[in-house]
Image (cartoon, rainbow, N blue to C red):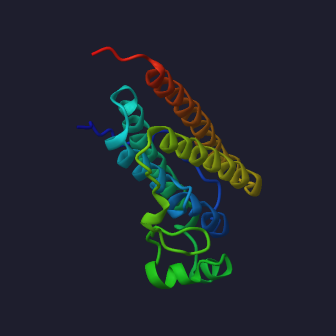
Amino acid sequence: MWTYDKKLQYPVRVSTCNPRLAKYLIEQYGGADGELAAALRYLNQRYTIPDKVIGLLTDIGTEEFAHLEMIATMVYKLTKDATPQQMRDAGLGDHYANHDGALFYHNAAGVPFTASYIQAKGDPIADLYEDIAAEEKARATYQWLIDMSDDPDLNDGLRFLREREIIHSQRFREAVEIIKDEREQKRIF
């Protein structure tokens, strides 16, 4: 199904150990508008979407897993040299106590990932508008993460992710128009 090339979609670099910034980035790992929720949402919605746009959901859903891997790498690099005290000071004491340095699907506030983040209505237009909203919310979150970060290396990767959210939103908008056009065509049997 896939060929695996053991490299990230875009290089991830981090200048310094920064567990506080890692805490914020975890929002995009296990939060409602994060990469895991997006990947699962799009891959799940494929079953009720018209064939003309099913490939788009497959492609973007798969790419979201690549973005999840980038976020995981960023969080790992930001925390790998952190002491337990630095983790506590950054607000990650609970995470450290439960998971040490392992990643866990939760948001920046520590709330565990839940399947209620994955929206699927079964109506292609409603689902695609949900997808557009999800991409725009993720874009906004990436911008806010950039605004909070003083790490130019990390920001480079975050800017890449923010731009991909914009592209995904545009592609979903195109898919809405394709489905609307298809619905308006007369059917002759």
Q: Where residue 21 sits in the image (x, y, percent)?
A: 66, 63
Q: Quadrant of the C terminus?
A: top left
Give coordinates of residue 104: x percent, y percent: 45, 70
Residue 11 in view (yes/no): no
The part of the image, by quadrant, that contains residue 15 is bottom right
Task: Name the spot of residue 24 as percent of width and height, x first.
Answer: 64, 64
Q: In what quadrant of the picture does the N terminus appear?
A: top left
Q: Is residue 181 left or right of residue 3?
A: right
Q: Residue at x 50, y 38 (%)?
A: 125
Does residue 34 sit above or below 84 in this rendering?
above
Where, by quadrant of the figure, is residue 54 drawn? Answer: top left
Outermost residue, left direction? Answer: 1
Residue 163 in view: yes
Residue in view at x 49 percent, y 85 percent: 97
Q: Position of residue 2 (x, y in %)?
A: 26, 37
Question: Which residue does the image show at 41% across and 16% down from the upper left?
Answer: 186
